[in-house]
Image (cartoon, helix red, strand yellow):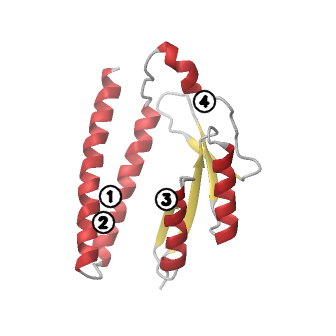
Amino acid sequence: MSKPRLRVSFSGGRTSAFMSIWLKQNMADQYDMRFVFANTGWEHPDTLRFVNEVDKRFDLGVAWVEAVPRRELGKSSGHREVTYETASRTTKKPQADQKAAGPTKLAKVETVALWHAVNWMEVVLREWKRDGFKDDQDRAQHEVQRQQLTTAKRALRKVNQLRKEQ
């Protein structure tokens, strides 16, 4: 029987690195894991070096991706695969220029990205429940994650409302 797939988002931070390494070392026999780093193009160069170093040192096989925005109405953004060497690097964040122009408006593509994250969390919890709990601690952890999902859904509804009011 093939192992269930597990996609792990590696943010480039220390906690995310720890979790990715821990998962690889402790759960690789249970899951077919794929690690993903989503480069915004505005990461600090040290973050990019850190992701690359952790990937190489712990053989995570990190897939580097970057968004490919589609500005046409009703079109979702795509992505492209890059490497450490080909990853976009921008020295100036756009937010610095936007401060004088007032608060940043939420784009639909941003709320769609949040929706995908919440949806993914829901899928993971559903599969976790379907596969059964190992013990009471596992069941309790699932309940904590379910409550966090409820909070995330509530926050997403608020963000969508704010975007509509802009």
Q: Amino acid at mark 4?
A: Lys
Q: Could you say which is closer to the camera, residue 81 or residue 26?
A: 26
Say which of marks 1 and 4 sits in front. 4
Q: Secondary structure at mark 3?
A: helix
Q: Residue 23's spot in the image, x, y percent?
A: 49, 72
Disc number at residue 126? 2
Pick out the residue farthest to the top: 101
Q: Is residue 124 left or right of residue 59?
A: left
Residue 44 lies, with reference to residue 141, above or below; the image says above
Earlier residue among tags 4 and 2: 4
Q: In whole angstroms, how far apart are the C-alphas of marks 1 and 3?
A: 22 Å
Earlier residue among tags 2 and 3: 3
Disc number at residue 11? none
At a point 32% along the width and 34% down the height, the residue shown is 159
Disc number at residue 15? 3
Q: Residues within 10 Å of mark 4 (few under 14, many from 20)?
A: few
Q: Which residue is denoted by mark 4 in the rendering? A: 93
Q: In whole angstroms, how far apart are the C-alphas of marks 1 and 4?
A: 32 Å
Q: Which residue is denoted by mark 1 in the rendering? A: 122
Earlier residue among tags 1 and 4: 4
Q: Residues within 10 Å of mark 2 (few under 14, many from 20)?
A: some
Q: Could you say which is closer to the camera, residue 164 or residue 39?
A: 39
Q: How many labels sit on residues?
A: 4
Q: Residues within 10 Å of mark 1 (few under 14, many from 20)?
A: some
Pick out the residue farthest to the bottom: 1
Q: Amino acid at mark 1?
A: Glu
At a point 46% along the width and 32% down the height, the residue shown is 74
At a point 59% along the width and 41% down the height, the residue shown is 40
Pick out the residue farthest to the right: 85
Q: Residue 4's spot in the image, x, y percent?
A: 45, 75
Say which of marks 4 and 2 sits in front. 4
Q: Secondary structure at mark 1?
A: helix
